[in-house]
Amino acid sequence: MKRSLQQIADAIGFRLIGDGRVEVGGVAGIRSATANDLVFVEDEKHLAAALQSGAAAVIAGEFASSATPTRPMLISDQPKLAFARAAQLLREEVSGNGESASVHPTSVVHPSAVLERGVSVEARAVLGENVRVGSGSRLGVGCAIGAGVTIGRGAEIYPNVTIYSGTALGDRVIVHAGAVLGSDGFGYVRDRKSGRYEKFPQVGTLVIEDDVEIGANATVDRGALEETRIRRGAKIDNLFHIGHNCQIGEDVVIAAQTGLSGSITIENGAVLGGQVGIGEHARIGEGVMVGGQGGILPHKILRGKGVAFWGTPAQPLRQYLKQLAAMARLANKEKKD
């Protein structure tokens, strides 16, 4: 299953230099590319290596327009983004959309489940009552999908993912191996007389919108009484936790080992580094960046599109660096004394 360069150029909006009849079936790095692959370069200094590689064609920036091509080139003002889009286009072509669902004989699919055309259910997966899976989606080995779960079109659910009842996934969602979606939140009520903790109802839902990607062994809790929601295009790394009632905005990026308590709001376009910790009811404003191991106290609000925060408690980067410098000067002074 391949596509011609002309088809790719037309679909994504490249400018094609060379033979558009050349076909490709995958993408690769410059060193490992074969005659079946596309490669890309963002910097002119790497163009010669790309043109000398084994690749069938090269995606490059406008700087390549005047080069003498030894193979076809696809020109874009954002070559890395164009490469990613081409890879997705080729993946969709390879995945295809068959006329009927494919279910491995060792899987257990409830008779009421609805599998649209082209769905693939791999070995030992279990699909509960009234599950609905959209066309072209794939459920990996050992997945457990609870009753009433809905999964949109073109989703990729990797092995051993568990999705609890009350969870809805949009189109083209990717969930990596071992993730758990829709589990109960960490909600308890303490009896002041006995000192014991009793479970607060965790009967809400989890909604994951289109084009979200969730990393391996990540956990996302359902809402307690209402919903937890991850909005369109959010990208979440491995080993991450989102507590109940959290609201994650569009195109948010969150690195590995970050943890969110309950009822946190992360607005559109925010970026969180690795091992960030956020207390309950905090709000991270649109476009805010929080550096690795940053700590945000409960109920704290961080604002400022494009502003970087760092440290614990997190504060604007310049302020934090000034404090570090002041502490270093104080330490040096004490040594001299």
Image: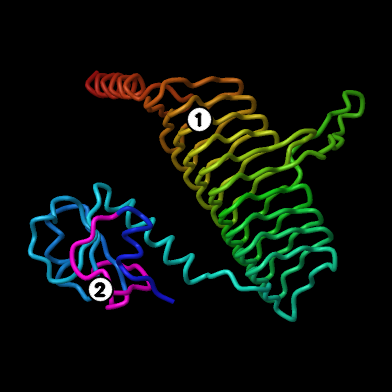
At 67% from the left edge and 55% from the top edge, which residue is drawn? 151
Across and down, in percent, residue 256 comes to 49, 47
Indicate the quadrant containing the C terminus: top left, top right, bottom left or bottom right: top left
Q: Please name the colour scheme applied to the rendered image.
A: rainbow
Can you tell which mark lies on residue 331?
none
Check residue 31 for magenta coloring: yes
The picture quadrant where one finds residue 320 is: top left
**Which span of residues is magenta-colored?**
14-36
Q: Which residue is mark 2?
A: 56
Residue type beneath disc 1: Gly
Q: How many marks?
A: 2
Instruction: Using residue 281 as the reference point, say whether residue 322 is left or right of it.
Output: left
Q: Position of residue 70 (x, y in %)?
A: 12, 71
Residue of label 1: 295
Q: Nearer the viewer, residue 23 or 31?
A: 23
Placement of 22 over or under 67, stated as above or below? below
Q: Residues within 10 Å of mark 1 (few under 14, many from 20)?
A: many
Residue 69 horizontal side relative to residue 38, left or right: left
Q: Residues within 10 Å of mark 2 (few under 14, many from 20)?
A: many
Residue 40, above or below 257: below
- The percent position of residue 27, horizontal first and vertical second, equals 34, 67
3D distance between C-alphas at marks 2 and 1: 47 Å
Q: Report the front residue among 1 and 237.
A: 1
Q: Reading the chain from its start, which is encountered first: label 2 or label 1?
A: 2
* Element class at badge 2: loop
How far across and how far down the image is residue 305, in percent? 40, 24
Secondary structure beneath dot 1 equals: strand
**Disc 2 to disc 1: CB gap under 8 Å:** no
Kind of residue sitting beneath label 2:
Ala
Q: Could you tell me what secondary structure mostly forms the magenta stretch? A: loop
Q: Nearer the viewer, residue 252 or 151?
A: 151
Residue at screen point 22% across, 55% down:
75
